[in-house]
Amino acid sequence: MTAAPPARPAPASPARRRSPPARRRPFARRAGGGQLRLALLLLLPAALVVFGVVLYPAGRALVISFYDVDSPFPGRYPFVGLRNYTEILADQRLWTAAGHTAYFTAVSTALELVLGLGLAQLLAAPLRLRWLFRAIVILPWALPTIVNGAMWRWILNAQYGVANALLTELHLQDGYRSWLGSDPFLALNMVIVADVWKNTSLVAFFLLAGLQTIPQGLYEAARVDGAGPIRSFFRITLPLLVPNIALVLVLRTIEAFKVFDIVYVMTSGGPASGTQTITFFTYLQAFSAQRFSSGASLAYLTVIAILLLALIYLRLLRQSELRSP
Amino acid sequence: MRASLRYRLFIHVAALATSVVILAPFAWLLYSSFVGQTDLVSRPMRWLPEHVTLDRYREIFAGGGTSAGAAFRSAMVNSFLVAGGTVIISLTVGVLGGYALARLRFPFRRVTLLSFLVTYMLPPITLIIPLYLLMSRFGLLDTRTGLIVVYCSLATPFALWNMSTFFGSLPVELEEAARVDGCSRLGALVRVMLPLSKPGILATALYAFLLCWDEFLYSLIFTSTAQAKTLPVAIAEFTGRNAVDFGLIAAGGLLAALPPVALAVVFQRYLISGLASGAVKG
């Protein structure tokens, strides 16, 4: 549950729209230099923090990726140019990990979106005890990711897990099976189950926020015109939710692409490296093998991949906004 | 009318089914934390336990020395201090900077705003290697201070963005009225904007707190002893090492989940309005 919200275009615009007329107001005369100085003063702490812990390290990481740094101690390390990149790109393990990451990202994001759409409808529906239902749905989201992973690991335990007990007693499976320990593909899917169980809530609440901005009058008009609930969902709800859907897709895709903690606690990347994701592979490369430079080049490849994903989504988002005025 | 009745029946059944899917794993965790070990590892499953015990909770709250309980308690304290410290720093910085970005006009305002936003999207794995090398040089590895510094890289860009969005959504007129009455810009920020921004500040603080409470990768790399280790790392270790003591893991996991879950349920409204205004964390 790390943060990566992109711009939501709407809220920034009111301030921008107001700015030209404001210039003509009495205080604008004192603007200019005074405002600049105040702005610098107010932004200084932010700039210090962001430079110190984000920009400088990001720059260092780029430099490190061109050297061959193999210990945490300061010293002289040989410059190797792009060799870290070419080596890591030729490494089969990277492509295996990339495959797992792509599968995890695509499947978990798709499931969370579809289930989240349904759940958002339910959260908005005229339920009795709606407050209680909302409080229940918010629970998985608040549950720390590591606790979620540990919980599912226990539920799916090969010898004593409740999933095995339940499924066996209901005769849905022949006997106890190792959900996380033998078949890599099964283990990856189980990690997805745990992730979807937790993050569908977030997606649903996010879409609920968009759902509540749709005027009820539209649905009534559709009903008068004889449209059923399914039709009005596809003709009204879905098109009007497109911006929210696009945004939540960007968010979840980027988060899922960086997945690390739930994999660490559920499977530690196993069995047979079958659940190793890119971040997990980078972590191993940098901190188990102490190949910091190789890790840094991997991290930059991740950044490039995430940027590409974000660009594709933003383009899709813009196109969809053009289509629905 | 019949269709409406059917619809109401359908949504209530669906809500009930969803609640069961959500609550069942929680219930199992709760059950596992109270039920005796022999019941937990019986095969076939004994659905009605023979022993109920408070031993895990006793161990966590009172276990001394090198016990798992002592490790858990120090991790709980570390998590609170680190999350609290990060929230205070990033919120202060975020309120000041966010106000400047939302209200003041200066060259490169949009560029500054966007560059803060981009820093927000950098995956932690990119920053972690240089931060590790830096912290080992400054002796900040395995300290709570070091962890607070690092967590600011997550929480500050977020708080900045969030607060500037929130300030931007407040009407300019109120602030101008205060300034006509003789308030300085800073005076208007403190006396008018801040009281109006309570929901925004609360939502930002909550998100930042949850973010820090949940963070795992940095803590895993930057801490190594009870001195600074946070809860997620302690729990991951329990899970790895005490692979047999499921009850203890369940009890620890529940206690670790209690603060964020309580906050989320109590402040539900603020969290949801935070989502609506574009502030999100995944």
Image (tube, coloured by chain):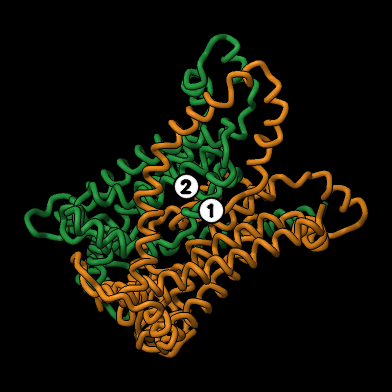
Taking A231 as reference, is B247 left or right?
left
Q: What is the chain identity of the residue bearing mark 2?
A: B
B186 on left or right of B32: right
The Cα atoms of the two marked residues, 2 and 1, are separated by 8 Å
Residue B133 can be seen in this image: yes
Q: Which chain carries label 1?
A: A
User: Identity of the amino acid at label 2?
Assistant: Phe
**Tint applied to chain A in the drawing:** orange
| Disc 1 residue type (three-letter) | Pro
In the rendered image, residue A185, in percent from the top left (x then y), is placed at 46, 86
Q: Can residue B72 be seen at all in this image of the molecule?
A: no
Which residue corresponds to mark 2? Answer: B158
Pointer 1: what residue? Answer: A5
- The chain painted green is B
Q: Is mark 1 on a helix, strand or loop?
A: loop
Look at the picture and state if A144 lies above or below A129: below
Q: Residue lying at the far left in this picture: please name it.
A: B65
Measured as percent of width and height from the top left, residue B107 is found at: 57, 38
Q: Which residue lies furthest to the top in this view?
A: B181
Q: Residues within 10 Å of mark 2 (few under 14, many from 20)?
A: many
Q: Where residue A249 sits: x, y (%)? A: 60, 63
The image quadrant of residue A180 is bottom left
Give the residue displayed 30% in from the left and 48% down from the top: B149
